[in-house]
Amino acid sequence: MSDQFEPLPAFISYTHADEQYINEFKNHLSVLKEEKYISIWYDREILTGSYWSDAIEQNFADAKIIFLMLSSDFIASEYCQYETKMALEKSAAGDALVIPIYLRSFHWSKSPFTHLQITPPDGKAVVSPHWFSRDEAWLVVTKQIKRAIQDYRKRSLAMNDRPVDTSPQHNKNVSPKIVNSSAEAHKEKGEASTGFTESAKSAPVSMGTDSSPSVTYWLSQGEARYQQGAYQSALNAYEEALQIDPKQARAWHQKGIVLLFLRRFDEALQAAERSLLLEPTNVLHLIAKANILQHLQRDEAARKLCMEQLPQLESACQNDPDNADFWDARADALRILERYEDALHAREQALSLEPALSVNWSDKGILLSYLKRNEEALVAYEQAITLNPHEAAYWNARGHLLADLERYEDALLACQKAIELSPQDASYWSSKGTMMIHLERYEEALVAYERAIALQAHPAYWGAKGNVLCTLQRYKEALDAYQEAIKLGPKEAVRWNNKGDALAHLGRHEDALEAYEQALLLDNKQALYWSKKAATLSRLERNEQALKAYEQCLLLEPDTIEYLAARAHLLFDLYENQQSLDALEEVVKAYEKILIKQPEVAHYWYEKGRSLLKLERHREALKAFEQALFLTSGNAEYWYYKGYALEELEDWEGALRSYNEALKIAALSAHYWKRKAFVLLHLEQYEQALEAVKQSQSLKTEDATCWYLASILLNSLERKPEALEAIEQAIALEPRTVQWLLVKGKLLFERRMNTEALHTLDKALLIDPRSFEVWVVRAKVLYLLKRYKEAREALTRAEVLGELDRDSLVLNKLLDDRSTNFITELFKWFRA
């Protein structure tokens, strides 16, 4: 402080309920006292024996600086209200600088001092959880007081020590627009409006010819607000500058940067273009434009711009190594070009010049995360938060880093903090949803995504909602969500892929295939999409086409074991020849190699087991499934395949237990209920089996196999008319399935409806003339119809195709006996 100034007498107006905080404040003001900015007085300095009211009034009258220590108790105090009124009168007369200090939170929307500069800024009370410590808050307060006093001194010199009217009606340094925008900014952030204004007391003022703030003033105000993270307030300041001088390139440039932080990317690009119209070769403006282009997903244009400007930037950094702006722009350009190590070096240079700028630490964190140095990135973001704890984006980024480090509970807390700071930002709700998924709290994740959608109907949020609904097995709702995502963003292949998944779960395989093909039209280099198409074609029994789709998978990812395995299984299902057996053996060997290195991966044990099943190595398959379940007991598919292996080993009780476990996890799987019914049939528990079939049919109505199984069970329960109706339903769904026609033929045969039975069996033979069972039953029917010659022919055909059962051998003997009797009678006739 220059010796030409005497310390300004300062008066502290407070309520005794806040006395402990006043002592802290006084201690922090001691630095300003030593530097001769102020001398301090408050009522604890009244000497014993002095008149209390006289001492206060005298010191209040002498004060050039008045601190109003705002709290709910202060507002409620009549005496403090009186002191506030007197202070404002002194301020209006230019006799004192009044500085309200936001000590403790309270509602103050109609308070008389909201037009004044209030500290700390941005609605952060000194006594609040916004700060890591109160010392940090007092440090901010002390710095702002120091700046205010410096400005007060300068204005006093400029006005030749004449009184200055600082009331809101006359002080042209206070912009009503800024006052309003500040309140709006706090409202946007979900904070209480503090009425904090960008008054002339917060920074030196450059005056125009009409005594109004100049472009320089508004630029400095914008920069100050930007550095504090108050982006809406900064934007208002830059717009004030541009109203004064619309050809101010720097103002357009800074406006673009602030709009970028506000995620108003199209407007940011317009501002950047305006700055370049005025200064077309300014490298800083060009890189700012590149940054905005990248956020607009115009990556190629952004990279091209950076490539063109990088040599000039490197030269600028060499010629002016102490200019942080050049290092900042260079770091951005290198990041856009994905040269992350070089970008990190440039960012650290910028940090060495501006270590107190939180965005520098944030950008360093981004680069470290790209380099997979997540622990270091986390440290960088924590430093950014220390410098600006009210920037929601920093908390959100911290949350994602913690999630990458699998610290999901901490990640959720960080994302929740971002929401508290900016509750109207949909992306933070989306981040919360992501953390809830990591924590397997799916219902809460769904709520978070719905909140994000309510704030911004972005296709990514609809897609995420669909994914959660799929996890919750609410596939119809998931499909609706994916449809909304596609409606808003139809060019993203992943959305069509997800739609295909939902349709597949709903059993709508033709529609699913169409969705996967649409995904491949948009991106045919994704092996995953080809594999989904292949699996769907396989379900539709279009196995030759499925095999070709798997070949495409292997062209793109030749070493992916899952695709090799799927191809081998399909080859086996198609041909069941030595080539397919060899392919399965190779798959088993491949999984065994992988499992030596990664024995803890349950999926590999499961896939090995599936291949062993096809090779009829059932006991080995069972061991593989048991190992998969030892590692991950909550997977329904693993339990299902264990049950299937036990079926093959004829351990029906064990199979039933496995299917029950599968159904505990996935009670909505029609297939699992159907397999359970088959096992119960083998255990002759027909009523329970029929109940399981009904459960399966309630989930999947048009399943011919279920109707076939129901027919078998109803027949076993002697409910033969119902059994016949059930098999008719199966045939209606799959009229060319020989097994269904055979069962119908048997049922008709049992009911002695032999002509109808013969007609049904003949239909079956038209489809498959090599069906052993059909020929056997046909022979029996013909025998009862006394068409013995045809019966003999049918039985002969059956003998060629397979080994006759006991009943068929009896029939054979009957036919032989009848043939012998016929020859004997014929011989007698000739003799006669």
Image (cartoon, rainbow, N blue to C red):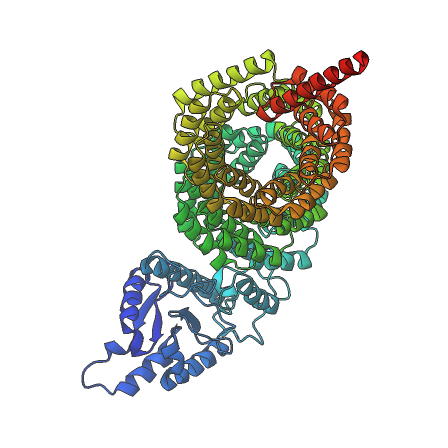
Specify whether residue 490 is in view: no
Specify whether residue 769 is in view: yes
Query: In the figure, residue 562 lies in which quadrant?
Result: top right
Q: Could you say which is closer to the camera, residue 475 or residue 412?
A: 475
Q: Could you say which is closer to the camera, residue 796 or residue 453?
A: 796
Relative to 364, residue 222 above or below = below
Relative to 190, residue 171 above or below = below
Query: In the figure, residue 808 lies in which quadrant?
Result: top right
Q: Could you say which is closer to the camera, residue 156 or residue 604?
A: 604
Residue drawn at the location 39% of the way across and 25% of the way down: 599
Rendered location of residue 133, percent (x, y): 32, 58
Relative to 577, residue 181 above or below = below
Rendered location of residue 616, percent (x, y): 50, 21
Rendered location of residue 540, percent (x, y): 69, 32
Relative to 292, residue 183 above or below = below
Number of marks in the rendered image: 0
Q: Quadrant of the C terminus?
A: top right
Rendered location of residue 53, percent (x, y): 30, 87
**Most distant residue in the front direction:** 832
Left or right: 671 as drawn, with respect to 52: right
Q: Could you say which is closer to the camera, residue 663 or residue 46?
A: 663
Left or right: 820 as drawn, with respect to 138: right
Q: Quadrant of the N terminus?
A: bottom left
